[in-house]
Image: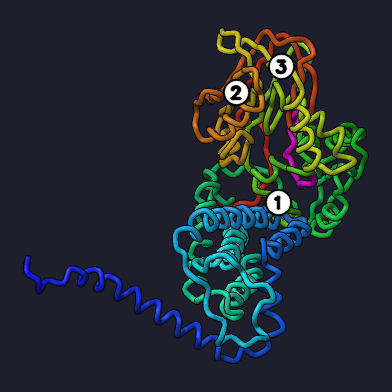
Amino acid sequence: MSPDVDLTAPATAARAPLRTLLDLDGRLFEAAAAWHWPGAERVLPRLSRSANHGVLWFATAAAMAASRTPRARRAAARGLVSLGLASLTINTLGKRSVRRARPVLDPVPLVRQLKRQPITTSFPSGHAASAAAFATGVALESPAWGAAVAPVAFSVAMSRVYTGVHFPSDVLAGAALGAGAAFLVRRLVPTRSQIRRPARPRAGVPALPEGDGLVVVANRASGTADRVRALHDALPRAEIVECAPEEVEDELEKAAARARVLGVCGGDGTVNAAAVVALRHGLPLAVLPGGTLNHFAYDLGVEDERQLAEAVRHGEAVRVDAVRFTTRDAQGVFLNTLSLGVYPELVRARDGWSHRIGGWPAGVLGALRVLRAGRHPLEVELGGERRPLWLLFVGNGVYHRMGLTPGRRADLADGLLDVRVVHGSRRPALRLLTAAVAGPLTRSPGHAAVQVNRLRLTGIAPGTPLAYDGEVTAVSGEMTLEKLPEALTVYRPLPATRRGT
């Protein structure tokens, strides 16, 4: 080998572009330090500190959720999940992969500097990643809320350069990573706007421009007063009947006798009662969500009184499936889900606590109590075979979900039952967790799924709790579940392109 050959030349050449970028980054940092930012001295350092540990974003999410609109709550949840994924990536991979020192603070005016300087490495910026992840996640679910959050997120990201704790490239890399985390979350859990509902024939229903002929029964216990007032403002000739939970069924029957359209405002249990009455009387149903979860109304595409009023005024409706279940002890109809096993016990435990601590905390507490309690799995005969089960879930239509908990339905008239089971074992919590992790899989060691249009179970022990649409009853012996295809006509707003067809 000739002594004139420089073996370090290729490595030096490869490092040259990186060195150029780092030099440019340093000059940009010094320029930012020397630039006068009008009015920023009192705002940006405080804003930067408020974003420590995601406190600013948790507070923002809480404020959004307090608005009580479904889209705001979904946007807040998506923003926090995106933030969590971005923070996890930054702390486990980003900071450990590139050990870049923080900028020297000499060029930064003392009034801008943070009182407590961060001790982690500089690349990438965790604050910028969290800000971008939260703002992008919110915007993907709700562009309006995203537009409100974006200036705050941008200011937080810029504050990291302003206070001298990050180079500009740290902030850009962190923001890119945060936005990427939000898009990954959307890929895993699609937004409602991504779910394409199949074009169903428009059902023939009366158009009620001012609500004349619409009788709405509202469950007072669901906290529906504001919504029914807003609906009455939009449809001034509609009749509104507010009643206690124990009076709902009687009031629905009375309303059906004089209504052209039967309306209901409440949670899924109240909607279920209205659907039974509407089916019996052959009436179209107008659903205004007023409970905690409102699975049926949201999957239908009705989230508030404005959307329902629009559908009623224009006479826009579709037909949806229902499911009839029949046992020796009970008979009924459900629009969302039916469950045997641990879930009905969870519902009972949740209902015992919800009036004291609220629905969601009660649900968590109920789940912990049910899973910790010693019990044997449910045994039923399914498909000609005796099987121990921790959970049998039956959905009215195919649910798209990530884990054990049902998510959303794109089609409420697909003619199918979505049947999912968690096999029995000595450890229910482990089995249920395995099934949740296996979510998208149709089969796993703890989880199985099938789609049918009819289901028959036998050998159900006396007193076995059954939950359907949030209600709980006891069953025994044999149970048959049968689809009622397009049995119920329900108002829902249609896309503008389909009006008049």
Cα distance in 3D space between marks 3 and 2: 20 Å
Looking at the image, residue 444 sits to the left or right of residue 81; the answer is left
Point out the stretch of residues depicted in magenta: 275-291
Tell me which label, 3 or 1, sits earlier in the chain.
1
Cα distance in 3D space between marks 2 and 1: 30 Å
Image quarter (top left, top right, bottom left or bottom right) of the N terminus? bottom left
Mark 2 closeness class: few <14, some 14–19, many ≥20 residues within 10 Å? many
* Vertical arrangement, residue 240 with respect to residue 146, above or below: above
* Vertical arrangement, residue 482 with respect to residue 10, above or below: above
Looking at the image, residue 479 sits to the left or right of residue 121; the answer is right
Residue kind at label 1, given as amino acid type: Glu
From the image, tell me which residue sits under label 3.
Answer: 326
Q: Nearer the viewer, residue 123 or 153?
A: 123
Residue kind at label 3, given as amino acid type: Thr
Looking at the image, residue 11 sits to the left or right of residue 363; the answer is left
Where is residue 401? Give x, y as percent.
57, 39
Q: Nearer the viewer, residue 222 or 205?
A: 222
Mark toward the viewer: 3 or 2? 2
Is residue 433 among the parts visible in the rendering?
yes
Disc assigned to residue 421: 2
Q: Is residue 289 magenta?
A: yes
Mark 1 closeness class: few <14, some 14–19, many ≥20 residues within 10 Å? many
